[in-house]
Image (cartoon, rainbow, N blue to C red):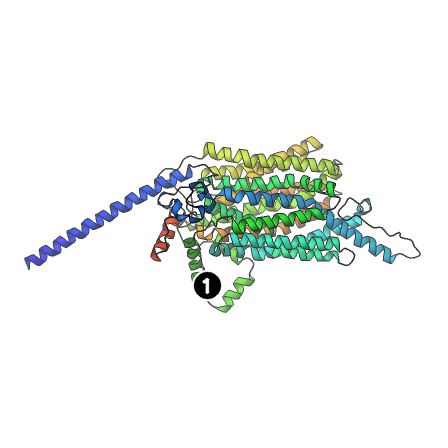
Amino acid sequence: MADTQAGASGGRLIQRSQNDEVEDNSRRDRESEDVDGIEAQSRPLLTPVETRGTNEVDDEALPESGGNARFKWLKQPSLMMLMPPFVLYALALGAAAVPRVNLVLTLVCQDYLNRKEREATNGDFMPIKLLLGADNPQCEIPEIGAQAATFTLYMNIITGILSAMTAPRLGQYSDRIGRRKLLILGSFGACLCELTLIVCLKKSDSVSYYWLLLASAFEGIVGAFTLILALVHSYASDCTTFAKRSAAFSLFHGFLFLGIAIGPAIGGLVIAKTDDIAVVFYGVIAVHCVFMTYVGFILPESLSKAKMELAEKQHVEDSRISASWGSRILGVVNVFKPLDVLWPEEGGNLTKLRANMILLAAIDFIMFGVGFGSMTVILLYSKVEFHWTTKFASYYTSIVNASRVVGLFVVLPLLTRLFRKKPQPGAPVGGCDRLDTVIIRGALTTEVLGTLFFFAAKDTPLFMAGGIVASFGGLGSPTIQSSLTKHSPSNKTGQLLGVIALLHSLARVIGPTAFNGIYSRTAKTYPQAVFIVLVVLFAIAWLAAWFITPYIAADGVGDGDEAVERLFAEERGQLDESEPLVGRN
């Protein structure tokens, strides 16, 4: 009996010793992960290969590189790998913007003149053949301008509504199958859009310009450029730490606006050299082909297999919860169902977490909607009040975009470098930090001041100053979107940014409709009224920004994401130490 008790006592001692050893090992692992995470956040932003502790990529793991360490970065997802195709995409987007507007105006004008010719009697109307896409003085009359504006609004509505329906679901789907396939899909849809434009251009005598609505449908079904931007941001989120995410987003926003600023000059030069507007659209299609080829064969996937399987597992679980056919059908039909990601059901600090996500999404919606919807009004107002020529308006647009690029390429990275402190072990990880909130509030302050300049301007210099001041509000959007990703687990990044694409798509419809309507009704009596509305909206967003609480995140954000992924992979024996966990925070 004594021997039995002694054996039991010895067994308990051995078990206690083993437990103590496990706890010591676990503590050392956590300390190592903290140090590694801090070191990761201090590396340069555009690093081709990020060494990730035990997950370092070795040469033997990459037989395609022939064991040459110089080429292993080709298999490592990074911002540097994504930058070249996105720069091409931004340039193509800018190059096609002005020719597309001219094409719509000319096709509408040609239809108007043809109708006038058919209605004419006794030779009262001489037939006119226009140069499609060129500057035709015959089209510069109010009736044609109003008809073209209305038709452009129809195109925006179709693109906006369709992309609002598809973009969030495609973004969520990218969490399960990866970013690359849907980047290719988005570019392919843009190709179909450009091909439809070319058909309408070349066959204008037999093809109605209403076929341009089909081009808008092709663009909207695949999410338009809002989905491309969401997927690019998702890729960047997979490859960067929390500390660098806003700087990474600002890079892509900067290149987008740089393309919008430089692209029109490239398109104008091409038209001047070839006297054929179709060449621009051929060039855009060629860029999309290069984009799809690069993404399909060169760009590494940013999501590891373990993360995609984790997202698939979560999707299956969500589908099981809403197993009834009625719930599934309502989920598909309801455009706003994806907004559930902004209202998490689990985790601590749920009230503050939900408030943060709703406030950030609402502020981003206001900033994008006002920015997109007021562009036309600002140019119309300046033309009427200050008699700007088209050439001078182009200069103004270039100056404002250049200022925005400076803010995104210089000011925001500099603020991040100077004022974002190196994280310490045990410091809060998830959620936006105090610097993020300061940048958001500062960006909204410049938007309010710039719009007040618009309202008060009695001459061109003050009006241009307002545009330059307001351009630094561009620092807000990448900071807001990166902050949103810090509030959500990484296996929902695509879904979250897809919801942002949904809101942007709705803003593309609501913004122009609302602000053009306000301006058209007050242009003769009080044209500054639209700027009062803009100031009020920005002021509301500015006040809302003061209710954002720093360092609030859902469970599983930060180091927990990596732990969940490693556990999930280990359970299935799929953890490959040569594969970097690129979604690591």
- Residue position marked by numbered label 1 in the rendering: 319
Q: Is residue 466 left or right of residue 45?
A: right
436 or 227: nearer the viewer: 227
Q: Quadrant of the N terminus?
A: bottom left
Mark 1 Cα shell of 10 Å, populated few (<14), some (14-19), many (≥20): few
Q: Position of residue 550 (x, y in %)?
A: 44, 42
Q: Position of residue 332 (x, y in %)?
A: 54, 62
Q: Position of residue 116 (x, y in %)?
A: 85, 55
270 or 455: nearer the viewer: 270
Q: Is residue 449 above or below residue 335?
A: above
Query: Under tag 1, what secondary structure?
Result: helix
- Can residue 543 be seen here? The reply is no
276 or 373: nearer the viewer: 276
Q: Quadrant of the C terminus?
A: top left
In this view, which residue lies farthest toward the bottom?
325
Which amino acid type is marked by label 1?
Ser
